[in-house]
Amino acid sequence: MAPDLAGGGAERILITFLECLNREHFEPMLVLCEKTGFYCQSVPKDVPVFSLEKKSRWSFLALIWRFKKWLKYNRPDIVISFLWYADAIQLLGKTEGSHKSICSFHTVPSEIARDRLGWLKIKLLKSLYARTDRILGVSKSVVDEINQLLLNGESAKTFVQHNPFEFDFILKSAEQNQSSWSQEQKGRIVFVGRLEWVKGPDLFLDSLALLPKRLEWRAKIIGTGSMHNALLQQAESLGISDKIDFEGFVKNPFPLIQQADLLVVTSRFEAFPSVIVEALSLQTCAISFDCPTGPAELIDNENGVLISPGNINALAEAIQALIENPQLAGTMAQKGPNSVAHLASDKATIMLEKHLAQTVNS
């Protein structure tokens, strides 16, 4: 169950799990609050899709009522919901003995708390998650935050569930076409993410401005967001606009990532940074702020570099060091694929199937 199938990370993960679930043991169905989004065309043909027909932001109570009707008619053994809005509808629609429930958490609770009316959302989620049988977090750090902020320190029903990555697909996509990198260009740096405060693109630009003028480099920023125009102005004011390419939305970013010398992640918060996994699988060296939850579970300073959060001076020094020492960057990059092999889609799906079976039988 999900709000919709917009082109986000959680929705892509949902589709991957639907594709990979063992049909000998599971008969999946998909419930959407609204049947819309980039991934609608990617739902496996054997998975029936039911829409709760969300009309507006005021449809919340109607969605709960329609979900109750769907439960009564279909009588599933278990419902797993992705993203907190779907969690709320699932758990408010749940009745005694109707079904077992799992909530799949794809964000950081502390980030929700910072939202407008975040305190109210946290209060609502606390009461809701008391009704679920199991909560899955995308990283150990996320699980720890769920326990502390939403479950008053209890941990009996929270577990880590790895995101599934289709490494064969990522590699084939990287080889599909030439990227816009010049083969002669040295110091190729890529940033991939929404151009929003939480992803820290402003910090990325600030760090690049600290690189010595003698150093040869070029950066590509892949992504869109509300900060786009401000970032253009920032790059201009920092005197580095001639070295930055704003690529916007790129349907297949993997050639750009694979042919870069460095991926740089400057997020202020993360749940589980998929782009780091993708870069490591493509043998691209990754540098990341050690922000709360995520990067430290992927980068161990053998396959990349972790920098203290927000320290743009240290980040600039690390970028310079790896550009000036491509052999070191290459050695780190070679260790990338093995370090993320446990996140392959087949292994992550087996992990999810165990959660489903254990919850149904509990």
Image: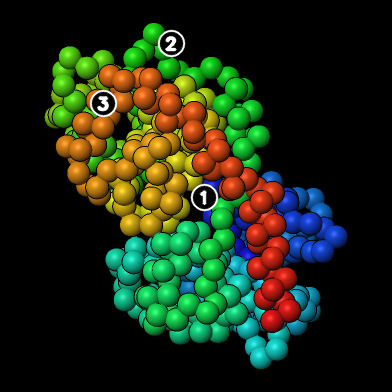
**Residue found at the very far right of the displayed protein:** 24
- How far is the residue under mark 2 from the one under mark 3? 21 Å
Relative height, residue 46 to residue 338 (above, below): below
Query: Upstream in the sequence, badge 1 or badge 3?
Result: 1
Q: Which mark is residue 302?
A: none
Give 223 or 173, whichever is nearer the viewer: 173
Which of the two discs, 1 and 2, labels the residue nearer the N terminus? 1
Say if 84 sits above or below 239 in the image: below
Three-letter residue code for mark 3:
Ala
Residue located at (73% from left, 51% from top):
20
Coordinates of residue 326 in the picture (x, y in percent): 36, 20
Q: Is residue 300 above or below residue 105?
A: above
Indicate which label's residue lies in the foreground, 1 or 2: 2
User: CB atoms at circles 2 and 3 under 8 Å apart?
Assistant: no
User: For residue 226, what is the image quadrant?
Assistant: top left
Identified by mark 2, the residue type is Gln
Badge 1 local density, few (<14 within 10 Å), some, or many (20+)? Answer: few
- The residue that disc 3 covers is 321
Q: Secondary structure at mark 1?
A: loop
Q: Identify the residue position indicated by label 2 in the image.
A: 183
Distance Cα–Cα, label 1 vs label 2: 31 Å
- Give the class, few, some or many, for how many residues have Cα within 10 Å of label 3's Cα (few <14, many ≥20): few
108, 234: nearer the viewer: 108
Q: Residue furthest bottom?
A: 96
Give the residue type that dot 1 points to.
Gly
Q: Disc 1 marks which residue?
A: 8
* Quarter occupied by the N terminus: bottom right
Q: Is residue 167 left or right of residue 225?
A: right
How far across and how far down the image is residue 255, in percent?
52, 25
